[in-house]
């Protein structure tokens, strides 16, 4: 019994070693054993988001329904399993049976490649996600977070390919909106990633997790806030959902897609939502670190997915409770607020982090609390700046209003002004 518990405590590493031993006994060479294990590991990694989204779609529908005073998925009609959990499976079967409809003027090759491309890009991010200590990661790249940013940028190409190849005005408008939004928000996103990288001294996702004896959300709340808003815009969630604004442009860049091609975009959307939660948890919430992980390493996956699920619930709240902003307001929020805030926060945190050892602050909690104070000061400065700008704009508006309501024209023209009440009396 004790041996079984030891095996389960580090299941993936022990299972890999056991399979490799079996392959050797069956006469398979070490190279081919490694290939088979890599393929099996890849399938397991891909299975995580695919399995999770069936549950997450149900959760999204339930949470948004409760926010909007509805029931959401239930068994009032055809029985769909306990709590209607199998409704997502029924939806998947329905989408698989739908007909592929290709517009007459579409560029067919690009039209078919776009949904495949967007799904592959969504899955490729999970390769570098650390689900636990050493051995529970597809590939521990030394440039792990840079790889994530690079792969997430590939969404631009799939959006353009889908919108342009459809030969549909709504799709093209959605593609242009999506590209402008993603390109804009990638700037504060990268600037928000740099503080955790700076404190860790590495781009490796595993190193970033290992460095968080105290989660970076404590010492870096402002970068965490910036990253959350930036990633919210990149995955296209309300209130920053303009690439597929259904009230304006039908379904955006995938308006002309149907059947499983539409399903590929739908799957990629939810996979990206959950991946955003996983990346946020890895960068700012300590990743897989949690109670009893040192004794039972397989628990690391549980803690990571739990933290990612909590971030996903925040996305669901925005989705169900927030109105959709206009595209010009979305871009103004980025260029006039997030980018300046990120550009100020990064050098201030870098300078503060370098000065702390010189003033005798060397303990982890001491450094975290000092950096928290710096973040609070930056946030207070940003709030004061917004208040000052708002007052300035209001003063300018009042002056402009007074200029038009009481024009400083020559006094002799004053008699030409007619009161509206006098006109009403004369007409009656």
Image (cartoon, rainbow, N blue to C red):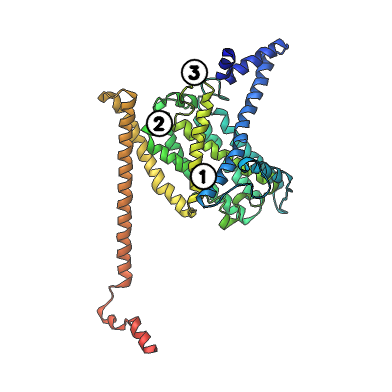
- Residue 187 shows which numbered tag? none
Q: Nearer the viewer, mark 1 or mark 2?
A: 1
Q: Earlier in the sequence, mark 3 or mark 1?
A: 3
Q: What residue is drawn where x is 59% and y is 38%?
A: 55
- Taking the image as shown, residue 68 lies to the left or right of residue 352, namely right
- State the CA–CA distance, disc 3 to disc 1: 34 Å
Q: Earlier in the sequence, mark 1 or mark 2?
A: 2
Q: What residue is drawn where x is 55% and y is 19%?
A: 9
Q: Earlier in the sequence, mark 2 or mark 3?
A: 2
Q: What residue is drawn where x is 67% and y is 15%?
A: 31
Q: Nearer the viewer, mark 2 or mark 3?
A: 3
Q: Quadrant of the N terminus?
A: top right
The one nearer the camera, 204 or 415, is 204
Task: Give above or below for 37 relative to 256.
Answer: above
Residue 95, given in percent of the width and then of the height, sits at: 69, 45
Q: Nearer the viewer, mark 3 or mark 1?
A: 3
Q: Is residue 110 visible from the viewing direction of this image?
A: no
- Taking the image as shown, residue 240 lies to the left or right of residue 17, namely left
Q: Which residue is mark 2?
A: 216
Mark 2 closeness class: few <14, some 14–19, many ≥20 residues within 10 Å: many
Residue 170, given in percent of the width and then of the height, sits at: 61, 55
- Residue 316 shows which numbered tag? 1
- Residue 295 shows which numbered tag? 3
Secondary element under disc 2, as helix, strand or loop, is helix
């Amino acid at each position: 019994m004790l041996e079984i518990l030891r095996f389960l405590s580090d299941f993936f590493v022990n299972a890999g070693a056991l399979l490799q031993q079996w392959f050797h006994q069956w006469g398979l060479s070490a190279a081919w054993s490694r290939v088979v294990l890599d393929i099996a590991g890849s399938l397991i990694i891909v299975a995580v988001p695919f399995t999770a989204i069936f549950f997450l779609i149900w959760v999204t529908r339930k949470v948004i329904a409760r926010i909007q005073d509805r029931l959401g998925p239930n068994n009032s009609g055809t029985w769909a399993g306990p709590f209607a959990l199998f409704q997502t499976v029924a939806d998947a079967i329905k989408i698989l049976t739908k007909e592929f409809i290709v517009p007459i003027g579409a560029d067919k090759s690009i039209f078919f490649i776009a949904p495949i491309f967007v799904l592959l890009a969504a899955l490729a991010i999970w390769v570098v996600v650390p689900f636990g200590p050493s051995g529970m990661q597809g590939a521990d790249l030394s440039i792990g977070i840079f790889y994530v940013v690079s792969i997430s940028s590939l969404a631009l190409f799939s959006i353009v390919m889908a919108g342009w190849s459809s030969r549909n005005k709504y799709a093209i408008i959605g593609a242009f909106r999506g590209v402008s939004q993603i390109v804009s928000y990638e700037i504060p996103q990268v600037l928000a990633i740099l503080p955790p990288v700076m404190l860790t001294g590495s781009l490796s996702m595993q190193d970033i997790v290992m460095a968080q004896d105290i989660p970076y959300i404590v010492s870096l709340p402002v970068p965490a806030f910036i990253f959350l808003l930036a990633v919210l815009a990149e995955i296209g969630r309300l209130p920053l959902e303009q690439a597929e604004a259904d009230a304006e442009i039908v379904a955006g860049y995938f308006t002309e897609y149907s059947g499983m091609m539409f399903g590929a975009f739908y799957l990629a959307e939810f996979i990206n939502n959950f991946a955003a939660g996983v990346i946020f948890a890895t960068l700012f919430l300590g990743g897989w670190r949690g109670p009893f992980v040192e004794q039972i390493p397989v628990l690391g996956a549980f803690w990571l997915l739990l933290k990612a699920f909590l971030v996903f619930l925040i996305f669901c709240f925005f989705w169900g409770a927030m109105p959709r902003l206009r595209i010009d307001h979305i871009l103004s929020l980025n260029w006039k607020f997030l980018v300046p805030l990120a550009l100020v926060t990064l050098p201030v945190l870098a300078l503060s982090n370098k000065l702390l050892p010189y003033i005798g602050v060397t303990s982890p909690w001491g450094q975290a609390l000092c950096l928290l104070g710096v973040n609070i000061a930056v946030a207070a400065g940003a709030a004061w700046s917004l208040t000052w700008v708002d007052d300035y704009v209001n003063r300018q508006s009042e002056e402009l209003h007074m200029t038009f309501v009481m024009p400083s024209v020559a006094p002799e023209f004053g008699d030409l002004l007619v009161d509206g009440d006098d006109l009403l009396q004369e007409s009656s």
